[in-house]
Image (tube, rainbow, N blue to C red):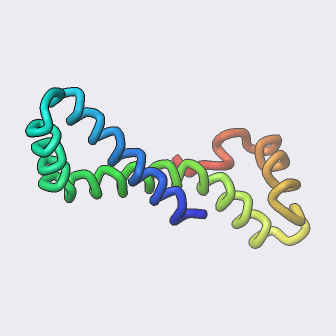
Amino acid sequence: MYYNIKIINSFIVFIVLSLVFKIIKTGSLKSKLALQEKSYLFRTSLYLAASASAEFFADIALAPMEAVKVRIQTQPGWANNLREGAPKLWAEEGIRGYVDF
């Protein structure tokens, strides 16, 4: 699941940057080939942006589950699964229970 999010975000960033280059450089076949060359030249920045965005969205998605999982593991009898624990944590601590500020 975690790796799928990174792959999807990498693909999305690649598509967005390709579209940006296409908007900037529209026209003949020569400009399209230049666009592909620029995409290739800036691939390191593209990978960096894709990795950073994937990590950001993965952290947002996984932090609440991790908070509930830790609570279940450290406090026996608190809840039996994620479906029971998530609403219970929300009722007890609100948003602060899910993230560590």
Relative to residue 76, is residue 73 drawn left or right? left
Question: In this rendering, is residue 74 above or below 68?
Answer: below
Relative to residue 52, is residue 40 drawn left or right? left
Closer to us: 82 or 100:
82
Q: In which quarter of the image is residue 67?
A: bottom right
Q: Quadrant of residue 2?
A: bottom right
Instruction: Kindly identify the residue that appears in the image at 79 percent across and 66 percent down.
Output: 72
Q: In which quarter of the image is residue 29?
A: top left
Instruction: Kindly identify the residue that appears in the image at 60 percent across and 51 percent down.
Output: 61
Instruction: Kindly identify the residue that appears in the image at 12 percent across and 50 percent down.
Output: 37
Instruction: Kindly identify the residue that appears in the image at 89 percent across and 65 percent down.
Output: 80
Question: In this rendering, is residue 31 above or below 99?
Answer: above
Residue 33, horizontal then vertical, whole percent: 13, 45
Q: Residue furthest front?
A: 29
Residue 16, horizontal then vertical, whole percent: 34, 38
Relative to residue 77, is residue 19 drawn left or right? left
Residue 88, horizontal then vertical, whole percent: 84, 48
Closer to us: 54 or 26:
26
Question: In this rendering, is residue 68 above or below 92?
Answer: below
